[in-house]
Amino acid sequence: PDKSMPATLREQQAKITDDDDVTFEGGKLLGGSKKPKVSCERQLQQILRYVAPPRKLTSGYGKLDDNGEKMKIPKLVMNRKLQFFMLMCMVLPQVYCWTQLSNEPTPYQQVSRWMGSFKHWRTWMQDPLFWMNFLSMALERVCYTIVWVRSKWFMKLCKNSFLREWGTPVDVVVRLFFVNKLFQFGGLFLWYYYSAPFFSVVNVTLFQWVTGLQLFIFGQVLNNAIYRAIGKAGVYYGVRLGQPVAYCTGFPFNVFTAHPQYFGSVATAIGVGIIMTTPAHETAGIFGVCCSVIFQYVYMGIVEEQF
């Protein structure tokens, strides 16, 4: 501190750390305050730490091992050639459809009709069948949230209840998966059947076949690749349930780094919806159902990232 400054100011300046966003001018604190100023950014960081304190990642491909020491995560190198190949498989058929198909309804007319169906969203929200379908899909999200967030409790439940007859905690999750899918497909079928007449294969346009099959095949490729990459234990939360899972840097993680399995499931659902849609189902909310699928997988991705 400058010796020519008053003693109180010298003591005050000596207490200020390098991180404090405070400057001096003419022997006075800028702004006339006698207290060091804390930047808005630091205040925001303090609030965030209080509201959502940082967690130790002990699982979920975490950065810390059981001893609390940092693990060396293998470097993930994106496969640009494979990315380009898969991109072309999606783009080129669409270029053909949009430039060569002129019979009505054209791709532009169909996409415009699909997007225009969202104007009926208030009707969707008032439909009990729509919410029944939403809840039937949400059941799986609830189960997986419990397994992920309360994994120790779930393991104890599997050990001390009738669930132990089903095998390991991962085996229990697998069985719950099939039960949940039964509810999901049942809810989807009931909504589709009672909302409008069933679609006719002869009325499905070439654009619908191309787009729907593209998304369906692409999604299934990602889903099957996940099983081959990390196995049953990796897919069904074995990393949270006491089963080691190797850190994978190959396909599909070197093409899609953020939840390729969820991306594949969403692509599959939208692909099936595009093939089976009809004008009546569009009005009833088939693309609203697709949006609810997207919402629930985004929710699950956030849960896995934050907890």
Image: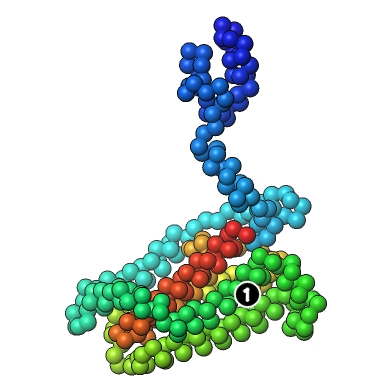
Q: Which residue is mark 1?
A: 143
Q: Quadrant of the N terminus?
A: top right
Q: Is residue 65 left or right of residue 99?
A: right
Residue 301 position, x and y percent, is: 54, 64
Q: Secondary structure at mark 1?
A: helix
Q: What kind of colouring is applied to the model shown?
A: rainbow
Point out the residue furthest to the right here.
Answer: 160
Which residue shows up at 27% across the image and 71% down it? 95
Question: Which image quarter is the C terminus in?
Answer: bottom right
Q: Judge from the rendering whether residue 65 lies leftward or rightward of residue 255; answer left or right.
A: right
Q: Residues within 10 Å of mark 1 (few under 14, many from 20)?
A: some
* Lateral position of residue 230 relative to residue 260, left or right: right
Work out whether 93 lies above or below 209.
Answer: above
Q: Which residue is pictured at 32% across the width and 82% down the height?
A: 283
Q: On the image, which quarter does residue 37 sit in?
A: top right
Residue shown at 48% from the left, 60% from the top: 79
- Closer to us: 6 or 238: 6
Give the percent coordinates (x, y) of residue 13. Answer: 59, 19
Where, by quadrant of the figure, is residue 275 drawn? bottom left
> Where is residue 180 drawn, in percent x and y?
59, 82
* Depth check, front residue: 4 or 186: 4
Q: Disc 1 marks which amino acid?
A: Cys
In x, y percent, where is residue 278?
A: 32, 86
Out of 280 and 65, give the one closest to the viewer: 280
Specify the farthest residue to the top. 4
